[in-house]
Amino acid sequence: MTNTARASLVLLNARVLTPSKGRGPGPCHAQAVAVAGDTIIGVGGNSIISAMAGEDARTVDCAGMTLIPGMVDSHCHLLAMAASLQGLNCGPAAISSIHQLRQVLQQEAGATPQGQWVRGFGYDDGAFSENRHPNRWDLDQAAAQHPVRLDHRSGHASVLNSQGLELAGITRDTPDPADGVIHRDPATGEPTGLLLEMAGFLRDRLGVTRNPAQFDRGVESLNTRLLSYGITSVQDAGPSNGLDRWQTFAQLQERGLLSCRITIMAGASRLSELQRAGFVWRLGDMWLRLAHVKIMLTFTTGTMAPDTEGLRELVAAAHSAGFPVAIHAVEREAVAAAARVIESEMGSILAAEADHPFIGPRDRIEHCAECPPDLVDLVRRSGAWVVTQPGLIYWHGDEYNTRVEPSLLPHLYPVGTLSRAGIPVAFGSDAPVTDPNPWPAIYAAVTRGTRSGATVPPVEEDGRVDVQRIPVREALRMYTEAGAQSEGTEDDKGTIETGKLADLVLLDNDPFEVATADLAVIRPVLTIIGGQVVWER
C-alpha cells in the first residue's frame, strides 16, 4: 500500500516482514518501506517506494537484510535496570559465595566516599555455596562505614547492613508492613537485614539514594542497550509507580536520555494520588502514556497477600476508576486466584455494562510462571491477557532443572499451552531480573532451550517434543504486535503497515531462515523510532 506523500526516509532492498492474517510477522512480503515524518506511508516494491522519496529524503540500502517492527518489552522495570547497570553485579556468574561477596563489597566500599550508599544487584541465595541469604552482619564486615543495600535477582528481597537499617528506621520494634516481612533472628528478635516484598517500604523510608550523575550514566547505558536490542517500546511494571515516576520518565525523555516509547503502569497504592492529579487511563501520548493498574499478588510472606477479598477490592477499585489491571502472579495458587477474581469482576462489569466506565484492553496476568494444565482453562475463562517471560527459561532454566519440582517443569512459562488454548500472550523481560535482549527469549520460546544448551524440562529418552514450544512467527509476534495489543496501542504500532508509526528494526539475520540454534544470537544493525534512526551498529 502507498500514498502520494513525499517520504523523508526510504528503506530499500529489505526483506520486510509484514503481517499475515493475524499470525504475526511472516516471511518476506515486500522489499521496501517509505516513511514521512514519524509514519509509514508506503510498503511495497523498490521502484514504487523509491518514487515516493522527497528531495532531501535519507535512503537506506538494507542489502537484503530483514526488517521487522520495533520490538515491545511488555514487562520491565526501567529505573531498577538503570540502577543495576551502575551498581555492583552480584549475580551468580560474578559471585558464588557470601565469602566472595564480602570481598567484593569491601573493594567497592574502599572506592566509595564514606557515608554514601554501596549498592549491589542480582544476588541469588541459592547460587551461593553457603546456600543462604547474606545478612546485615555479613555486610557490616565488608562495609561498616557505608550504608549497603543488596537486591535479590527476583526483585522481591533486599538485604541492608546495620547502617542501612538505621537509615530506614528498622529496629527490632518495627512491625512488619502489611505486605512484607522483616526477617528476624529467632533467638533475639533483631532484624537480620533480609527484607521481603519491601521495595516500596524502602522507597518511602529512604527516598532517593542514588547518585544523580551515576544514575544518569545508568540510564544512558540502558538506553543504548535497549536500542541495540531493537526495543522501541517498553511497558514499565513498577508496583510503586505514581506521579513522581511519571515525572521522572517525562524528564528523562525530555533530556534525551531515554529514546523508547514508554507506557507505565500505575501502582495500585498510588492510583488515588494519580487520580487527584487528573490522571486517567491512556493519559499521555505515544511517547509516554498511562496504562494498567499494577497489583502485586505474592506468597513471599508465607500466605497469599492480599487475600482473595482484598484482591477483589483492588481490582474493583481500578475498574471503577476506568483502568484495566495487571496482576503479578507467579505461583500456581496466585495464578488461580488472579484468574478467578478477574473472571468474577468482568462478569459483574458485563452485567452492568451500560453504567460502568471501564472500557479498553483486557486485564492482564503478569508472569503466569506456574500454570499446570488444570489452570489453563481457568485462565482462558477469565479473558485476561498473559504477559510472560520465556527469557527466564533461557537465563535460569539450568537452575530450574535442579531446583523445581520435576512434575512442574513442563508447565513453567507455558507459552505453547496458553497460546493453543486461545489465551492472548505477549512477552516481556522483567529486566533487571533478566537481560532485556528479546532474542534469547524468542529462542527459548521456540526451543525451551537454556543458555547451556539444555532444555526445560530435560529431554527424556524418548526424545519427546516439548508441548510449550511455539513457531518463530508466533514468538516474534508476541514481542511485536501482541505487545502493542496488550497495552491497547495496536492501531498505532506493532506491525509494518501504512499509517502506523515508523518503529522499525533491521536485523543481521532472518529469523525464518537462520538455524534454530542461532535465534538467540540475532542482532539488530539499525533501530528506527518515529522515522528517526536512533541507533546503528
Image: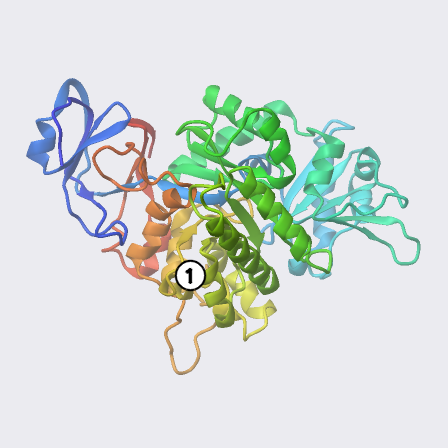
Establish if 89 lies above or below 46.
below
Colour mode of the rendering: rainbow
Q: Nearer the viewer, residue 370 or 488?
A: 488
Task: Give the quarter of the figure containing the C terminus.
Answer: top left
Q: Residue at x 14, y 40 (%)?
A: 31
Does 286 appear above or below 368?
A: above
Residue at image mark 1: 415
Q: Residue furthest right?
A: 188
Amino acid type of the residue that numbered disc 1 sits on in the rendered structure: Val
From the viewer's perspective, is 251 left or right of 12?
A: right
Quarter location, residue 523? top left
Residue 67 x, y percent position in the rendering: 24, 41
Residue at the limit of the structure toward the bottom, as seen here: 462
Q: Position of residue 383 (x, y in %)?
A: 44, 56
Q: Nearer the viewer, residue 244 or 356?
A: 356
Q: Where is the N terminus found, in terms of image quarters?
A: top left
**Compared to 58, does 472 lie above or below?**
below
Is 277 left, or right, of 38 in this rendering?
Answer: right
Secondary element at tag 1: helix
Residue lying at 74% horizontally and 29% vertically, measured from the top left: 116
